[in-house]
Image (cartoon, rainbow, N blue to C red):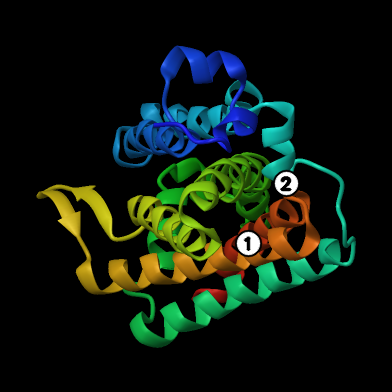
Amino acid sequence: MRNASDEYLLRPLWGRLLGQPAWVLCLICYFVLGALRVVGTLGQSSDRLALVAGFVIMWCLPFILYSRTGRQRCGIAKIDRPVWLFLGPVLGVISALLIHVVGFGFFGTTPDNWYVTVRTSYQADPRLVESSQLVQFLVFTTPAVIFSPLGEEFFFRGMLQVSLSERFGVPIATAGTALAFGLVHLLHHGLGVGEAGLQLLPISGSLWVVLMAGVSVLFALVRAKSGSIWPAVASHIAFNIGMNYAFFYLLP
């Protein structure tokens, strides 16, 4: 059943046509987008475009499903405290480097290190392995600062968190969004497909989910303190740059 908040979050068309509250529609979108990410990360190399498609859909969803007021509630609005355009990226880089320290400290360069797993997936193309570190860094960092930061912030810290907060309150919404964000990143480390079939790394995979959930809380904090989604996007971009720097320059 819809409540009064959905009257301004959703476009009237979707409210009348679908008859579902905003948070239910966002959860449906989460599972559809998750399916695209499964295909894009665990499928064949030719399926990688499904991952990009998922991010592009995330870009578009606030403008398709949400009203102008709903988009403003998501933080697609003027920044109240511009200082967070500086603080957000600083915190993003620091968190990426701290996660590197944790992974290397616990797991070294074994496959249980999440950054090793992601770097290995990057280097699946032998042509890139033969390139210099700088070329590899630029090739993989360029899409990493374009696609996921904007898409994931619009959807997770924007649509999903706002719709959940209207129904369940801010603390539960922040925790729920963090869990959803952490679990979807299990597809990048912790759950994979090898010669023996589906493979699970229960210990490091669980720790990776917890760390990514913590990163989600950080982005939510930046979004709340700044009054806008844009510093959270900037923080996410900086996190991805820091993460890729660790892949190519800090890991042995």
Q: Residues within 10 Å of mark 2 (few under 14, many from 20)?
A: many
* Outermost residue, front side: 4
Residue 241 visible in image: yes
Residue at coordinates 62% horizontally, 61% vertically from top-left?
220
Q: Position of residue 110 (x, y in %)?
A: 32, 74
Q: Is residue 193 left or right of residue 164?
A: left
Residue 111 visible in image: no
Q: Position of residue 109 (x, y in %)?
A: 38, 76
The circle on residue 29 is none
Q: Position of residue 184 (x, y in %)?
A: 38, 50
Q: Is residue 114 left or right of residue 214?
A: left
Q: Residues within 10 Å of mark 1 (few under 14, many from 20)?
A: many
Q: Quadrant of the N terminus?
A: top left
Q: Nearer the viewer, residue 155 or 236?
A: 155
- Compared to residue 32, the image places residue 190 above or below, namely below
Residue at coordinates 48% horizontally, 48% vertically from top-left?
167
Q: Position of residue 80 (x, y in %)?
A: 87, 57
Q: Quadrant of residue 12?
A: top right
* Outermost residue, left side: 196
Q: What residue did someone put label 2 on? A: 75
Task: Name the amino acid type tagged 2.
Answer: Gly
Q: Nearer the viewer, residue 218 or 4?
A: 4
Task: Name the amino acid type tagged 1.
Answer: Phe
The disc, 2 or 1, on the residue closer to the chain's N-terminal end is 2
Q: Is residue 26 left or right of residue 77?
A: left
Q: What secondary structure is found at the residue carrying circle 1?
A: helix
Q: Quadrant of residue 222?
A: bottom right
The circle on residue 219 is 1
Q: CA distance from mark 2 to mark 1?
A: 12 Å
Q: Which is closer to the viewer, label 2 or label 1?
A: 2
